[in-house]
């Protein structure tokens, strides 16, 4: 994937980001603390809701870092190794408590949104990172998260 390909308007992207984040929030809040730690959401070695929130939060932090580079003039467009970044970020968050993971995700989102709001006219690279970490990323995870929450709720009965 290469940054610079996105041409959606900033306001539409911001609205999509809010909708996606709040959909994720609603699903997470529908679970008990114990359910958030149950492995089965995704793949091997197996993700829990804590893991997916840590993953999303880490991408939000990465996007914030890239926006800081864009603003500072030190950003260099490059091919983005999605799988490599995923592995690195998951490793960094693996094993963290729900409280740490949730706080990190919220903090990263807030920092990203603050940096985004301070950019008068986000260029293609900034918009790409915002979409990749925000609305597009939420859209990747929400369908499975909805299924997983339903599966966990069915186990309650």
Image (cartoon, rainbow, N blue to C red):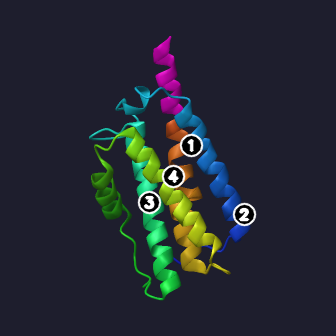
Q: Is residue 2 visible?
A: no
69 or 47, nearer to the observer: 69
Q: Tags 3 and 1 in contact by the CB under 8 Å rule?
A: no
Q: Secondary structure at mark 1?
A: helix
- The residue singled out by tag 2 in the image is 12
Tell me the residue at 42%/38% (across/down): 49
Report the magenta stretch's main SS: helix
User: Is residue 154 among what the camera can see?
Assistant: yes
Q: Quick one: SS at disc 4?
A: helix
Task: Give x and y (percent) for residue 116.
Answer: 60, 71
Start-end of magenta stretch = 146-157
For label 4, count other residues whose C-alpha is less than 10 Å away and answer few (under 14), some (14-19) or many (20+): some
Q: Residues within 10 Å of mark 1 (few under 14, many from 20)?
A: some
Figure check: 31 above or below 5: above
**Where on the picture, by quarter, is residue 75?**
bottom left
Residue found 63% across the figure and 45% down from its top: 22
Whole-angstrom CA distance, mark 4 to mark 1, is: 12 Å
The label number, if any, that marks residue 24 in the structure image:
1
CA neighbours of label 2 inside 10 A, class few (<14), some (14 to 19), many (20+): few
Mark 4 or 1, nearer chain start: 1
Q: CA distance from mark 2 to mark 3?
A: 20 Å
Residue 106 marker:
4
Which disc, if any, is residue 59? 3
Residue at the farthest top position: 157
């Amino acid at each position: 994937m290469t940054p610079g390909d996105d041409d959606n308007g900033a306001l539409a992207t911001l609205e999509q980001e809010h909708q996606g984040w709040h959909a994720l929030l609603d699903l997470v809040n529908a679970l008990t603390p114990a359910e958030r730690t149950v492995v089965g959401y995704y793949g091997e070695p197996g993700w829990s809701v804590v893991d997916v929130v840590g993953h999303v939060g880490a991408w939000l932090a990465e996007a914030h870092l890239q926006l800081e580079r864009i603003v500072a003039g030190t950003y260099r467009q490059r091919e983005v190794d999605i799988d490599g970044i995923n592995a690195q970020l998951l490793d960094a968050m693996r094993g963290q408590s729900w409280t740490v993971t949730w706080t990190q995700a919220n903090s990263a989102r807030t920092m990203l949104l603050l940096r985004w709001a301070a950019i008068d006219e986000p260029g293609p690279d900034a918009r790409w990172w915002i979409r990749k970490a925000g609305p597009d990323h939420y859209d990747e995870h929400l369908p499975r998260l909805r299924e997983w929450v339903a599966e966990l709720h069915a186990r309650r009965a």
